Amino acid sequence: MAGAMKPLSPSLPKLRRSTESTRRFGTTSKALPSSILGCVGNTPLVTLNQIRTREDITVLGKLEMQNPGGSIKDRTAVSLLKNGIRAGLIKPGTRIVESSSGNLGIGLAQACRQLGLALTIVVDSRTSSKVVKLVKLYGATIEVVRETRDGESLLDARLRRVRELADSSPDVYWVNQYQNPANPAAHHATIGEIIRETRGQFDRIYVATSTCGTLAGCREYLNKRALYPHLEAVDATGSAIFQSKDKANLTKRHLPGHGSSRQSDFLKTDYVDGVTHVSDRECVEGCHFLLQQEGILAGGSSGGVISAFRRDEPYLESGTTVVLLLCDRGERYLDTINDEEWVEATLTSN
């Protein structure tokens, strides 16, 4: 990676006031983020009045697309790196490696660029060209897995390649979003912000699932505070997260962001109160509805969350407050979700 390595701080990312900012803006000004990574989190929670059909319920949207890298995965990326730095596993000269189909790769690329860390993201042939370009723009290296071995999914093949890279040198560190407890720990803050903004007065929350880090982190934090809103997991039709690992049960998915070809290492059976499976087409319809009604351009998993809520809305009790976790923004899906020709050509039977 070009440029000198920046020194790493074990307190990354921390909001702190520098001497310079105090001198310029005075001691009464709000503490300024020490870097772009200090802007991760504290995303807006907004009322969504137009997507509901009933006036006796309240619908709130947590706009995770407002994170600087454009998705909730910014939180995960910072947490994974922060954990590795604190543990002494990430040092100047360490190369970070990870498997990603999209947003985590972008979040890691942004964070590693700011920290001066080298990064390799392993993707597969289905990964959006926009994601690849963004990751490269931040200075990271991309490896594309195009072939699988007998019985492997593309995710299995990506993980095999990541392990090979991690084993190739002591200076290579796999942050491992699939098993690292820093993944769910990142979302203690996510749900904590929702609790603070609502004073804990919400009844249902809809969370898209992939690694299940967000879902697990939210439930862990809620349980510690003896808060038990209904937690609805929104999974992709054809995903293996909540069904048998038998690959014969799986169907092809065209949209990244939720669902998985493997079960989660973070998921416990009592973490969820319900599971809604949504098709790719329902994700597209949810995205279009959110844009038309609220002016919010969001990604595929957010569309799935919207469709899951709309399916449940007629049956909710009067006075229910619902929180919808909207994970990323929609500009990265201009040639898929927001391209009518792609939708009709790809999802005709979906």
Image: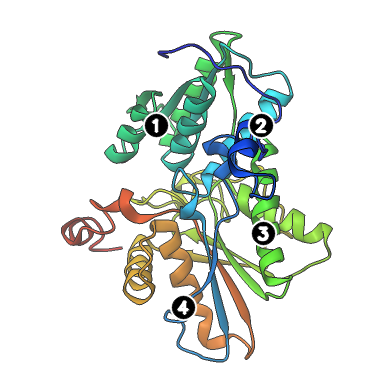
Q: Can residue 14 be seen in this view?
A: yes
Q: How many neighbours does mark 3 have within 10 angstroms: few (below 14), some (14-19), or many (20 or more)?
A: some
The residue under the point 47% across, 81% down is 49
The label shown at residue 193 is: 3
The residue wearing badge 4 is 310
Q: How many neighbours does mark 1 have within 10 angstroms: few (below 14), some (14-19), or many (20 or more)?
A: many
Q: Can residue 100 be seen in this view?
A: no
Amino acid beneath label 4: Arg
Residue 141, position as x, y percentages in the image: 39, 21
Query: How far apart are the alpha carbons under marks 2 and 3?
Result: 28 Å
176 or 91: which is nearer to us?
91
Question: On the rendered structure, is 263 left or right of 122?
Answer: right
The label shown at residue 175 is: none
First in sequence, mark 4 or 1: give its number.
1
Residue 329, position as x, y percentages in the image: 40, 54
Q: How many neighbours does mark 2 have within 10 angstroms: few (below 14), some (14-19), or many (20 or more)?
A: few
Amino acid beneath label 3: Glu
Q: Is mark 3 on a helix, strand or loop?
A: helix
